[in-house]
Amino acid sequence: MNTIMIRLLSAVSLVVVAILGADLLAAETTKKGTKAANHAKKHEAKPTTPVVIAEKNINEVEALLGKAVIVDARGSGEEAIKGAIFFAANADDKDIHAKLKDKTAEILVYCGSVSCPASMTLAERLIGLGYTNIAHYAGGIKEWTENNKPTDDTKEKTKA
């Protein structure tokens, strides 16, 4: 009888430990889940006012030559709007900050043509990096050259 009693007590003890362990595990999981939920809530994106990027037409862009920083978002090319600097849409933040030191300067971003998304991608990145005066020229180098507007031939610059 003692053996049966010992086995029965052992079985009951194991069941009690299993139940208590399950309760402790559930409590810990709930605690962790609450912490994770609080952390996520604390760091969730705050709703912001959508940023509107001013759209410039070809004549407005020409008027900006020598006054604004003109950025070609193609990263490189054979022709560029006169005075433009090149930054790929995925350019390194450090490179951007090194060449665009004034975050309040007027900056115009363009790329190949209306169908090229690189300029809007870069414009949005610049805004995200804290630049405050960003404009976009959708017509890009295609419209610019078709209208015989002033360009820099980057091949010639490279040869010089």
Image: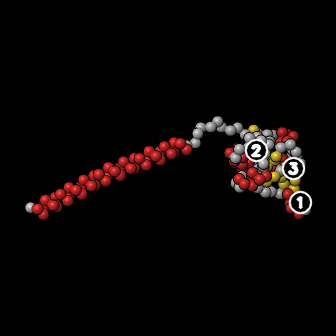
16 displayed left or right of 137: left
Badge 1 crowding class, 10 Å Cα cut-off, few under 14, some 14 to 19, many 20 or more, is few
Distance of label 2 from label 3 (alpha carbons): 22 Å
Q: Residues within 10 Å of mark 2 (few under 14, many from 20)?
A: some
Q: Position of residue 132 (x, y in %)?
A: 74, 41
56 w.r.t. 150: above or below? above
Residue lying at the far top of the rendered structure: 49
The reply to whether residue 94 is visible in this rendering is yes
Tell me the distance, in whole angstroms, between the alpha carbons under discs 1 and 3.
13 Å
Give whichever of discs 2 and 1 has the lower sequence position: 2
Residue 56 x/y as whole percent: 79, 40
Seen as rendered, the residue at the extreme right is 160
Circle 3 is placed at which residue position?
82
Can residue 115 be seen? no
* Element class at badge 1: helix
Q: Residues within 10 Å of mark 3 (few under 14, many from 20)?
A: some
Which residue is rendered at x = 58% and y = 39% of the image? 46
Question: Could you tell me the amino acid type at mark 1?
Answer: Glu
Contact, CB < 8 Å: mark 1 with mark 3?
no
Residue at the image position 81 percent from the left and 40 percent from the top:
57
Which part of the image, by quadrant, shows the C terminus? Answer: bottom right
For label 1, the residue is 156
Judging from the image, what secondary structure is the residue with disc 2 in? loop
The mark closer to the camera, 2 or 3, is: 2
The disc at residue 103 is 2
Question: Is residue 121 found left or right of 139 in the rendered image?
Answer: left
Asked which colour scheme the image uses, the reply is: secondary structure
- Camera-side residue: 137 or 105? 105
Q: Amino acid at mark 3?
A: Lys
Local SS, label 3: loop
Q: Nearer the viewer, residue 13 or 135?
A: 13
